[in-house]
Image (cartoon, helix red, strand yellow):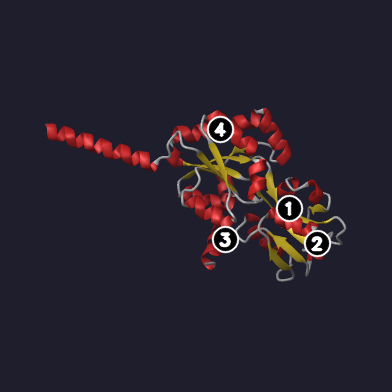
Amino acid sequence: MIARACFASLCLLVLSVFAAESSPAADSPLRVGIVPYNSTAALMQTHKPLRDFLSQKLGRKVVLYSSKDHAHFFQETLNGRFDVVLTTGHFMPAMIKKGFEPLLCYRSRLEISVVVRKDSDIKTIEDLRDKTIGLPDYLSLFYIGGMQWLDSVGLAKHYNIVEQASHITAIMAVASKRIDAAITSIYPLRQASKETQEQVVALSLTTVSFPSILMLADKKLGDQTVKDIADAFLAFELSEAGRQFFVDTGYIGYRAVTNDDIKAFNEYAKLTEKILESRP
């Protein structure tokens, strides 16, 4: 009888240790990873109000991270570096398989825009023929979607692609006359410096758009913590700091993630897998 009791106690001890090792401690910093659509410094500055609000609402330290490029962000997420991610949706299916739960999505959509200098002679799609076009790094949603769009409008191989580190560097390359145009979104443009914004303009040459940036949380945090995080995001939207954040970024607000959102990215997720397989 005593032996059985001791064995039961030992089992409970092992299970408790395993749970402690597999679940992040409630008092440890919450690690939030942001897809690198901008420089790390700019992302940290833009999301500082969110970080501060989440920290206060959740009663724990919140640390923001990004990665040097989309490939590293994707791999670091799958490797468990982040507890919560703000990501574009072509990574979402793989992250769900890895144990992340979709929480929310910005209400704004990500629309492909073509950014040119204000004095550029590029006005139409055909004007892009044989031009030098900048795209964010090869694993970004806008690189994959942008290449698809260029081919779909009859410009296949009739352009010179120059890969850029991020949306912002692509826009800045246009402003400094190093490239003719950039395929990007209006949201990074809104977060560019005033000097850069004064030199370029976004052309609406396409109706291609995607559901916006999504927030996902690692289920290892536990059901209650995941719910608390989702509630904290929603509370941020209603706060004074949150309202200003959405004015500054143009993301409008949050909404629930739907099955249609997930389905919308299945094709891009498959293309992402092919790209990863083709590159070392």
Q: Position of residue 206 (x, y in %)?
A: 75, 55
Check if mark 4's residue and mark 2's residue have beta carbons within 8 Å: no
Assess disc 2: are there few (<14), some (14-19) or many (≥20) residues with their C-alpha within 10 Å of its C-alpha: few
Q: Mark 4 or 2 closer to N-term? A: 4
Assess disc 1: are there few (<14), some (14-19) or many (≥20) residues with their C-alpha within 10 Å of its C-alpha: few
For the point 80% across and 49% down, which residue is it?
197
In 3D space, how far apart are the residues under numbered discs 3 and 1 (Cα atoms)?
20 Å
Left or right: where 31 falls relative to 196: left
Residue 54 in sight from this viewpoint = yes
In 3D space, how far apart are the residues under numbered discs 4 and 3 (Cα atoms)?
36 Å
Q: Position of residue 256 (x, y in %)?
A: 58, 37
Left or right: where 19 falls relative to 278: left
For the point 59% across and 36% down, which residue is it?
51
Query: Which label number is shown at residue 207?
Result: 1
Assess disc 3: are there few (<14), some (14-19) or many (≥20) residues with their C-alpha within 10 Å of its C-alpha: some
Residue type for callout 1? Thr
Q: Mark 2 or 1 closer to N-term? A: 2
Question: What residue is pinned by disc 4?
Answer: 55
Question: What residue is pinned by disc 2?
Answer: 177
Which quadrant would residue 2 be assigned to in this image? top left
In which quadrant of the rendered image does the N terminus lie? top left
Residue type for callout 4? Ser
Question: What residue is pinned by disc 3?
Answer: 271
Which quadrant would residue 43 be assigned to in this image? top right
Residue 141 position (above or below residue 100): below
